[in-house]
Image (cartoon, rainbow, N blue to C red):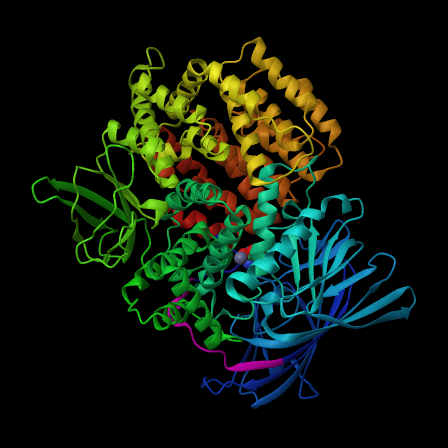
């Protein structure tokens, strides 16, 4: 494999403090697409914590024009310049550096550093993009105060933004103008941002809890102002929520959100100037689905919450990424749950989180890119913005709250800020704050940060009717050589009447009459004894998914049905249904693999359970929808020793068709009962109704006859919102019905709405009838481009990641397609290419014939000249 320079692995254990600290940064930009001049004046001083006297600056894809040290122009021999660093040896203890560089934003297709999107300038500096703008010690433990002067053509770029407060602006003559910004807070370079653009904004002043007025702005391209209300509302809700839940206030006079169409990730928490993928800003009922609205709320919250967890207290080094990401995901999850406000709504958000973990994080943790929440090494940090660092990291933070209680967790947070405001710290510092604020020993809890893989917890139970004891014996197993984790296992016991039994845990501390207790599993095996248990109960284990583990317990169908019908814990209630479904799916898959698709059967018990939940009007529609969704093909695959994607697809489709046929009257009735007439609102109840209704439609469309087809067509034509419109279209496409005219109509209606055209590509890419050849065909569409990540992801990623039966077509055509586009994308945008590269992570789990073809495709990519990003993923996959 060839890379630009051979990839080096960076190890956490090699951390050393920077030799020089930076106090102030003054940046001057003369912005022009092909040639931007950056003047950078930094004051540095020797770090007493370092013994080195060498100033090491990072720099990449920029041209050095001149360099002065304490006013003196340096000659080439005074410093060492490599592809990625500029080093000044034996520097004096106090230094002013003046650095002039040139870059070419319009040629920057990586979308890291300073780049142009639709004619406007944007930056993306996390993790290591600032070095593509100027030479700098581009590491998060170097925190400095920034002043930024922007100069640009006034007509082309009327809006000039950077971090902090606007302190001056004016004309320069010759059609140019300037704006000067000052950020009063010290920050690491990855939080720097600028925008120079033709944009418009929705703005408003907002009163903080302490009475201060702040200016809130949402900046978008002209024509999109009809899609900013929800982002603005979400921002205000976020500010309020952080004041109330954590007593954290906005520390600036002004907070800006800017939407950009070309962006590698979801959004970025630059201090006071959040830059967002348009996908997480722009929404109105016509263009955005309920899921889009929920995504906007979550991401606006996420970026806002970073202001404290990430910006005020940041990471010492990138190995600590989960310090800010795990914590901030946890905060945005809690925010979204609180915004719904009901217990059942909260449970629905929790179930969604569990689904994400199983769909993406568990597979990652079991594959070639597995890493601890705090990784020990990496080649390219951009490859470590993962579901493990984010979602498992959030689970780790949630476990503190489960162990310490909400108040205890809050005390830990308060102490964390008291100790570390303005600092760059580690995951250990966070854990220490949690422990110290609660006088708890959390030493063993550290293993959640250092040991990769999903632990398996096995439960056994025994009941002694004479002594009235019920024992739960929990054991855990991690990977070879791992030490036991500290695992909170929330447990309840159900009686035959379906009610929770009041619990008395021997040697346990819990409230009298509690019906859920948290067992702390800290050794390889432990026995937990409940006393005064009058009947053999059915245990509900791992309530609310209290730890990111795989739970093994030999439930009988009868027990699962009991839990599915009665568990007071909605997550475990849902889980019982998933177990019932999974058992059947695995059996059916095995049958298909062995004997083909004829003669498949489904028991009435299961159908009846589905009917009961579908028609139980006491349950939230949103919950019923989740309970009726079968485990995904990916999740089923994770349960199999050798994965047979076609058999899985056939089995799951059989199950869907059987449910669709058997419950037809009930599905139709619920379809009609859960309409949401009147003005669209994305609130959780209405969204839940639409979700249930549209799931009913998709079941009905599993074996469509004329009546169902008509229903979809009618819904498509009369829909007043994107949720219903796109659901009808997806139902048609995915059922294999002739959807051509509807696809055309949809395209025409939304031709000028990039985010909707993304949906148009995505729904076709994920259709089980779409093979690699069809995707290639779609790529010829004039609206397709590889350069915009959203578009590339919509078509390519939805095919490789959301269409397993076609991606794993026996002829290997999709693998060849994958290899071709990993290579093509790598030349444009390595970060996006590396994400696509990961579609092959689990290649060793497939049948030998598929494996061989996958390996061939991997090797084809490996033989190319690759970015470090893709090289790391491919090397690890093949290792
Ligand atoms: N910190 C951002 C995620 C992010 C990371 C890298 C980016 O560019 C390579 C962009 C955004 C967040 O957690 O939202
Ligand atoms: Zn984040």
Q: Residue furthest top?
A: 706
Between 638 and 86, which is closer to the camera in this rendering? 638
Image quadrant assignment for residue 72: bottom right
The residue lying furthest to the front in this view is: 513
State yes or no: residue 641 in magenta: no
Point out the residue furthest to the left here.
466
Image coords of residue 769 (percent x, y): 53, 21
Q: Which of 363 and 258 is in front in this view?
A: 258
Image side of residue 546 versus residue 212, left or right: left
Name the residue: 60% across, 69% down. Answer: 189
Q: Is residue 12 magenta?
A: yes
- Name the side, left or right, on which 226 lies relative to 264: right
Q: Give the residues in magenta.
A: 9-23
Q: Position of residue 102 (x, y in %)?
A: 72, 67
Q: Is residue 415 visible?
A: yes
Query: Where on the picture, by quarter, is residue 848?
Result: top left
Q: Which residue is located at x 45 percent, y 63 percent?
A: 323
Q: In this view, does 249 lie above or below 779?
A: below
Q: How many marks?
A: 0
Q: Which of 231 and 422 is in front in this view?
A: 231
For image coordinates 37% across by 54% down, the residue present is: 371
**Image location of residue 707, percent across then percent down:** 58, 10
Q: Is 610 displayed left or right of 290 in the figure?
A: left
Residue 285 image point, x, y percent: 68, 36
Q: Which residue is drawn at 69% across and 34% down?
A: 679
Residue projecting furthest to the right: 174
Which residue is nearer to you in this view: 790 or 511? 511
Tell me if residue 380 can be seen.
no
């Amino acid at each position: 494999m060839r890379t630009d320079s051979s990839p080096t692995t960076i190890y956490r254990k090699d951390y050393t403090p920077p030799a020089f600290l930076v106090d102030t940064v003054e940046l001057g930009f003369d912005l022009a697409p092909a040639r931007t001049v950056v003047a950078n004046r930094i004051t540095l001083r020797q770090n007493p914590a370092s013994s080195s006297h060498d100033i090491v600056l990072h720099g990449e894809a920029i041209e050095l024009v001149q360099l002065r040290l304490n006013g003196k122009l340096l000659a080439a021999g005074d410093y060492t310049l490599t592809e990625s660093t500029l080093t000044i040896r034996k520097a004096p203890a106090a230094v002013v550096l003046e650095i002039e560089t040139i870059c070419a934003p319009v040629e920057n297709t990586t979308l890291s550093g300073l780049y142009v999107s639709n004619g406007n300038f944007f930056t993306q500096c996390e993790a290591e993009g600032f070095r593509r703008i100027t030479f700098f010690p581009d590491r998060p433990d170097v925190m400095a105060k920034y002043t930024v002067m922007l100069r640009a053509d006034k007509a082309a770029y009327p809006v000039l933004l950077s971090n902090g407060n606007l302190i001056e602006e004016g004309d320069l003559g010759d059609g140019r103008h300037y704006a000067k910004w000052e950020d009063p807070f010290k920050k690491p370079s990855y939080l720097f941002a600028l925008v120079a653009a033709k944009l418009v904004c929705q703005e408003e002043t907002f009163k903080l809890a302490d009475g201060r007025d702040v200016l809130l702005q949402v900046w978008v391209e002209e024509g999109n102002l009809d899609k900013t209300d929800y982002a603005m509302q979400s921002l205000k809700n976020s500010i309020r929520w952080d004041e109330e839940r954590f007593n954290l206030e906005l520390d600036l006079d002004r907070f800006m959100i800017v939407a950009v169409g070309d962006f590698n990730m979801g959004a970025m928490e630059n201090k006071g100037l959040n830059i967002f993928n348009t996908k997480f800003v722009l929404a109105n009922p016509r263009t955005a689905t309920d899921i889009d609205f929920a995504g906007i709320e979550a991401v606006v919250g996420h970026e806002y919450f970073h202001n404290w967890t990430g910006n005020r207290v940041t990471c010492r080094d990138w190995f600590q990424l989960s310090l800010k990401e795990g914590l901030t995901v946890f905060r945005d999850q809690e925010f979204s749950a609180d915004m719904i406000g009901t217990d059942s709504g909260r449970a629905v958000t929790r179930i969604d989180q569990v689904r994400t973990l199983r769909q993406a994080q568990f597979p990652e943790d079991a594959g070639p890119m597995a890493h601890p929440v705090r990784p020990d090494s990496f080649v390219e940090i951009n490859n470590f913005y993962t579901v493990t660092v984010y979602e498992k990291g959030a689970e780790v933070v949630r476990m503190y709250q489960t162990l310490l209680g909400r108040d205890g967790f809050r005390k830990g947070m308060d102490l964390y800020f008291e100790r570390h405001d303005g600092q760059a710290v580690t995951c250990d510092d966070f854990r220490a704050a949690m422990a110290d604020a609660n006088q708890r020993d959390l030493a063993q809890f550290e293993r959640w940060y250092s040991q990769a893989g999903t632990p398996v917890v096995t439960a056994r139970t025994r009941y002694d009717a004479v002594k009235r004891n019920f024992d739960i014996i929990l054991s855990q197993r991690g990977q070879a050589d791992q030490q036991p984790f500290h695992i909170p296992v929330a447990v309840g016991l159900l009686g035959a009447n379906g009610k929770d039994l009041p619990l008395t845990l021997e040697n346990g501390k819990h409230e009298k009459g509690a019906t859920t207790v948290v067992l702390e599993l800290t050794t390889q095996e432990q026995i937990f004894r409940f006393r005064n248990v009058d009947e053999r109960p059915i245990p509900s284990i791992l309530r609310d998914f209290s730890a990111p583990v795989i739970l093994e317990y030999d439930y009988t169908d009868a027990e699962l049905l009991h839990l599915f019908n009665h568990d007071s814990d909605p997550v475990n209630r849902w889980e019982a249904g998933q177990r019932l479904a999974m058992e059947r799916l695995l059996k059916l898959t095995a049958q298909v693999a062995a004997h083909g698709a004829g003669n498949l059967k489904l028991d009435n018990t299961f159908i009846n359970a589905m009917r009961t939940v579908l028609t139980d009007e006491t349950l939230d529609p949103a919950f019923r929808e989740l309970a009726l969704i079968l485990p995904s093909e990916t999740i089923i695959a994770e349960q199999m020793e050798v994965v047979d994607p076609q058999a899985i697809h056939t089995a799951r489709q059989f199950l869907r068709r059987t449910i669709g046929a058997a419950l037809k009257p009930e599905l139709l009735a619920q379809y009609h009962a859960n309409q949401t007439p009147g003005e669209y609102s994305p609130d959780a109840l209405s969204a839940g109704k639409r979700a249930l209704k549209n799931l009913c439609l998709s079941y009905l469309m599993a074996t469509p006859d004329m009546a169902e087809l008509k229903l979809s067509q009618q819904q498509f034509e009369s829909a007043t919102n994107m949720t219903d419109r796109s659901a009808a279209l997806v139902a048609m496409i995915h059922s294999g019905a002739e959807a051509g005219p509807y696809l055309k109509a949809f395209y025409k209606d939304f031709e000028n709405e990039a985010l909707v055209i993304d949906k148009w590509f995505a729904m076709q890419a994920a259709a089980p009838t779409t093979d690699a050849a069809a995707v290639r065909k779609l790529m010829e569409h004039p609206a397709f481009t590889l350069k915009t990540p959203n578009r590339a992801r919509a078509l390519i990623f939805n095919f490789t990641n959301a269409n397993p039966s076609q991606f794993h077509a026996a002829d290997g055509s999709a693998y060849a397609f994958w290899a071709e586009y990993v290579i093509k994308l790598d030349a444009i945008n390595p970060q996006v290419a590396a994400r696509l590269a990961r579609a092959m992570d689990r290649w060793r789990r497939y049948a030998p014939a598929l494996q061989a073809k996958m390996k061939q495709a991997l090797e084809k990519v490996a033989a190319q000249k690759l970015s470090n990003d893709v090289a790391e993923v491919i090397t690890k996959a093949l290792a």
